[in-house]
Image (spheres, rainbow, N blue to C red):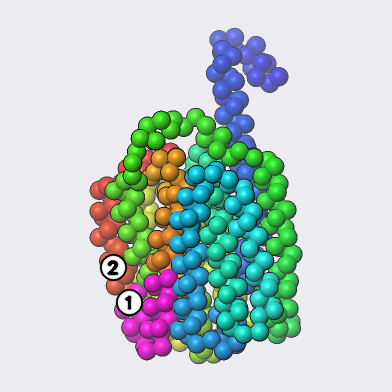
Amino acid sequence: MLSYRVILLIGEKTIAPEINHSEDIDKRKAAFQLILLLGTVSMFGDIAYEGGRSISGPYLAMLGASAGAVGLVSGLGSLLGYGLRLISGYFTDRTRAYWVLAFVGYGLIAAIPLLALAGNWQLAAALLILERIGKAIRSPARDTIISYAGKNIGRGWGFALHEVMDQLGAVIGPLILSFALITTGDYQKGFNLLWVPVVLVLVFLILARHKVPLPEKLEAKVDTTSHDEVKGLGRTFWLYALFVLLAGAGFASFVLISYHIKAETLIIDAQIPVLYTIAMGVDGVVALIAGKAYDKHGLMVLAIIPVLTLPVPFLGFSYNYWYIISAVVLWGAVMGVHETVMRAAIADMVPVTKRGRAYGIFNAIYGLALFIGSAAMGFLYEISTHYLITFAVVMELLAVPILFLLKKSVSVDPAK
C-alpha cells in the first residue's frame, strides 16, 4: 500500500522501479535480520567453546600435558578445524545444503561441556579437537550465507556485525568460567555450565533457517554465467593465500601464552579467562573498524596485521604482568582483522559459484598456518623463548613483501 501511495503522490514514477526499490529494501531487511540471527547463534556458540578454550591451556596442564603437547594439540585442532574445510567447502558448493552443514557443525560444540568428564589430558585433547572439526563443518556454509547477505549491506560491514556478536559471546564465556573457578575452584563445574548456551545455539539456528531457508536468493541478481567459465580462483587469491599462510604462522596462540602464564605462575588461574575476555572485547571493537575500513579501502587494510602481530611474542612470553596485558590486547586486535577482512575479501575475490570452495581452501591454509606456528612455537618454547620469538618475527617479515605483490595484483572492488 505504501508503494502505491508514493506512486499516487509522485505521478512521474513508474510502478516497476518502485517495486524493485521495495524488493531491495526487503532484501536488505532480510539480510540484516539473517546476520543478526547468525550472530546470535555464534554468540552462544562462543560462550560455550571460547569459554572452554580460555582455560584449555591450564586445564591440559593440570591433567599432566607438557608445553609441547599443548602446542601440538592447539595446532592440530587448528589444522583439522581449518583443513577439513576443503572438504566441507566443496560440499557446500556442490550441495548448497548450507543449513544441514551448519546444524551438524554447531551440534559438535557439545564436546566442550563434555570436557567435564575428561579424566586425562588425552581425552580432553580429543574433545577439544572434535569441537574444531565441528567448526570445520559449519564455517564454509555459514560464511557463504553471510556473504550472500552481505551483498545487500556491504560485505565488510556484514562480517563485522557478525564478528561483534560472535565476540560478545567470546567475552561472556570466559567470564562464566572465571566466575566458576573463583567460586568453586572446580574446572568440571565450569564446563557443565556450558550446556545452556549449547542448547540456545540450536534454538536460534532453527529460527535463522526458518527466516531465510534459501539464503542464496539474497544474491539472486548476481550474473553467474561468466563465472562458470572461470577455471581457477586467480593469481590474486593465491597470493592472498600465501600471505595468510605466513602471517598466520607467525601469530602466537593464546593457548600457548596462557600455558606460559600458568607454568611460570605469573597470574592466578581464575584471572586467565579474564585476559581472554579482554582479547575478545578488543577483537569485537577492532572488527567493526576493520570491516568499515575494508568496505572503503579494500584488501590493503591487511597491512596492519604484521604491524600488530610482531610485538605479541616479545610481550606475551615475558615475565612482566603489564607486558602480558599488552600482548593480549594486540592479540585480540589481530584476531579482529583476521575474522572480518580475511573472510569478507574472499567473497569479492572469487566467482559466486566457487565461493564455498574458496572459503574451504582459504580456511585450510589458515589452519595449516596456525598448526605450523603453534606446533613450532610450542616445541621452541621448551628450548628457549628466544627461538620462539625469532620464528614468529621471521614469518611476519616474510609476509610483508607478499602483501606488496598482492597490492599489484589485487582486483577487489571495495565498493562491492
Residue 115 versus residue 200 in the image, above or below: below
In the rendered view, tell whether residue 184 sits above or below residue 238: below
Residue 185 location, quadrant: bottom right
Magenta part of the chain: 371-392
Residue linked to disc 2:
397
Mark 2 packing: few (<14 Cα in 10 Å), some, or many (20+)?
Answer: some
| Closer to the camera in the image, 392 or 266 | 392
**Residue name at image x 48 percent, y 83 percent:** 69
Q: Mark 1 — residue?
A: 391
Residue under the point 28% across and 62% down: 400
Query: Which image quadrant: the C terminus?
Result: top left
Q: How many numbered callouts?
A: 2
Task: Reply above or below: 204 against 253.
Answer: above
Q: Tag 2: residue type?
A: Leu
User: Whole-Å distance between the Cαs marked 2 and 1?
Assistant: 10 Å
Return the residue found at the far top: 11
Crowdedness near tag 1: few (<14), some (14–19) or many (≥20) residues, C-alpha within 10 Å: some
Could you say which is closer to the camera, residue 405 or residue 211? 211
Q: Is residue 310 visible?
A: yes
Label 2: element kind: helix
